[in-house]
Image: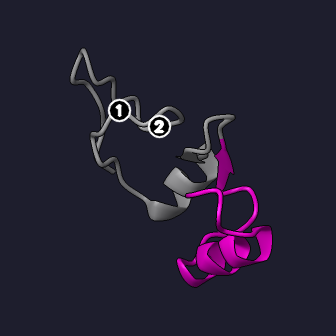
Amino acid sequence: MDDSSSQPERSARLERLGLEPGDYYFTEEGYLVFTEQYHRKRGYCCQSGCRHCPYGFHEKEGKGRTR
């Protein structure tokens, strides 16, 4: 997200995407990071090496479960 977006605009955008508090957080650099809570609600592994993947996928090792 760019710096021109205000917090209320950002919150409204995330709500439209169906994200709830606890589904994500922002890094110091401003990146959106999905939490384990979000991944479990989604219900499958996308095999992208997500930081909080609860399905055991490791980008380098290529291991994981898809359900």
CA separation in Å, label 1 and label 2: 7 Å
Q: Which of 8 and 24 is in front in this view?
A: 8
**Helix, strand or loop at mark 1:** loop
User: Which residue is rendered at x = 25% and y = 24% of the image?
Assistant: 63
Provide residue 60's location: percent of width, then percent of height.
Answer: 25, 16
Q: Residue furthest top?
A: 61
Q: Quadrant of residue 58?
A: top left
Q: Which residue is drawn at 24% across and 15% down?
A: 61
* Residue designated by label 1: 49
| Quadrant placement of the N terminus | bottom right
**Boundaries of the magenta span:** 1-26
Circle 2: residue type: Cys
Q: Which of marks 1 and 2 is in front?
A: 1
Give the left or right position of residue 9, taking residue 64 as reference. Answer: right
Residue sitting at x 74%, y 69%:
6
- Looking at the picture, how far across and down is residue 4, in whole percent? 65, 65
Q: What residue is shown with label 2?
A: 53
Residue lying at 66% horizontally and 68% vertically, measured from the top left = 5
Q: Residue 4: within the magenta?
A: yes
Figure check: 55 above or below 13: above
User: Which residue ends up furthest to the left in the rendered image?
Assistant: 62
